[in-house]
Image: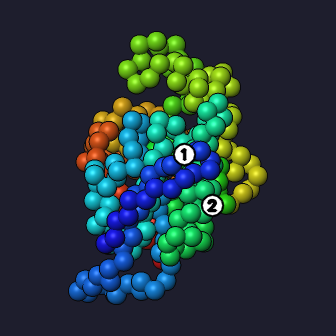
Amino acid sequence: MAVFDITLFSNTLRRIVPITAIIPVEAVEIPGVPKINKSKPFRSLYLLHGFSGGHLDWIRGSRIEQLSIMYNIAVFCPSGENSFYLDDKVRGALYEQYICGELIEVTRRVFNISKEKKDTSIGGFSMGGYGALHSGLKYNEVFGNVIAFSSALITEGIEEIVKQPDNPIAPPSYYIHTFGKPEEVRGGDADPKALAKKLIDTKAALPNLYMACGTEDMLIASNRDFDAYLTQIGFPHTYLESPGMHNWAFWDNYTEKALDWLDGLSQ
């Protein structure tokens, strides 16, 4: 296992940014399991952190190093600050373009990873779950697979959120700055429901979609709502629930389940 701490100048963010890259270079042999061909380009998984997190969250909180070896997949963890992985045009910090364009291009130039859409996945938890869904649905020509845990699908209730001056997460000004005018969010470019409906209406290629949320998670209602909406519009997806809270115990468990699901897509 090779873990790289990378810094690079991002043109889309206009500053130096960090990335953690996990590359399963070892040819691990497990009795009874066919030897993996390491000469082929790796599949890639871009994992996004949650609100107030950073690029080290996945490697600190989960078994992603072990899972990278087990599933022979290269993992890249960028830092998205508290951007919800959307373009911040006010500051000129284009996180959406960074994650879905520049980051992909840079990692493909530096590492031996596949350029095929079917081998390119994006995932995340909480804010990162929203980011994975938004990126995967909007950039369906880039990402073939989306993995989203405990997704912060807050666009449905954004108008109520900004009415709470004592919100413990962030003040109303943050949400307005990040998502735009509250009354214009639903149905717009930042709304995962609108993005999913657009793909269905235009008969575009749909990414494979895996979602999971704990039944004790504070975000369970919005995840159930999104699952029901995808079913209503005929968007194929996998949605799972089990006892669990908004924490690494749940996300780490489902990361392995999601990678099993990802392997099953090619069988």
Measured along the vertical axis of the image, is residue 126 above or below residue 112? above
Q: Residue at x 39, y 44 (%)?
A: 54
User: Residue 23 at x, y = what percent?
Assistant: 39, 70
| Amino acid type indicated by mark 1 | Arg
Measured along the vertical axis of the image, is residue 129 above or below residue 146? above
Q: Looking at the rendering, in which quadrant would you find the N terminus?
A: bottom left
Q: Quadrant of residue 220?
A: top left
Q: Secondary structure at mark 2?
A: loop
Q: Secondary structure at mark 1?
A: strand
Q: How many marks?
A: 2
Q: Residue at x 49, y 72 (%)?
A: 111
User: Residue 163 at x, y = what percent?
Assistant: 52, 13
| Amino acid type indicated by mark 2 | Val
Which mark, by number, is residue 194?
A: none
Which mark, by number, is residue 142?
A: 2
The CA distance from mark 2 to mark 1 is: 24 Å
Q: Within 10 angstroms of label 1, few (less than 14), some, or many (20 or more) residues?
A: few
Q: Within 10 angstroms of label 2, few (less than 14), some, or many (20 or more) residues?
A: many
User: Residue 109 at x, y = what percent?
Assistant: 57, 70
In depth, the one of 207 and 162 nearer the eye is 162
Q: Is residue 241 visible?
A: yes
Q: Residue at x 28, y 52 (%)?
A: 60
- Compare marks 2 and 1 and give the one earlier in the sequence: 1
User: Residue 110 at x, y = what percent?
Assistant: 52, 70
Residue carrying label 1: 15
In depth, the one of 153 and 114 nearer the eye is 114
In depth, the one of 254 and 170 nearer the eye is 170
Q: Residue at x 45, y 47 (%)?
A: 79
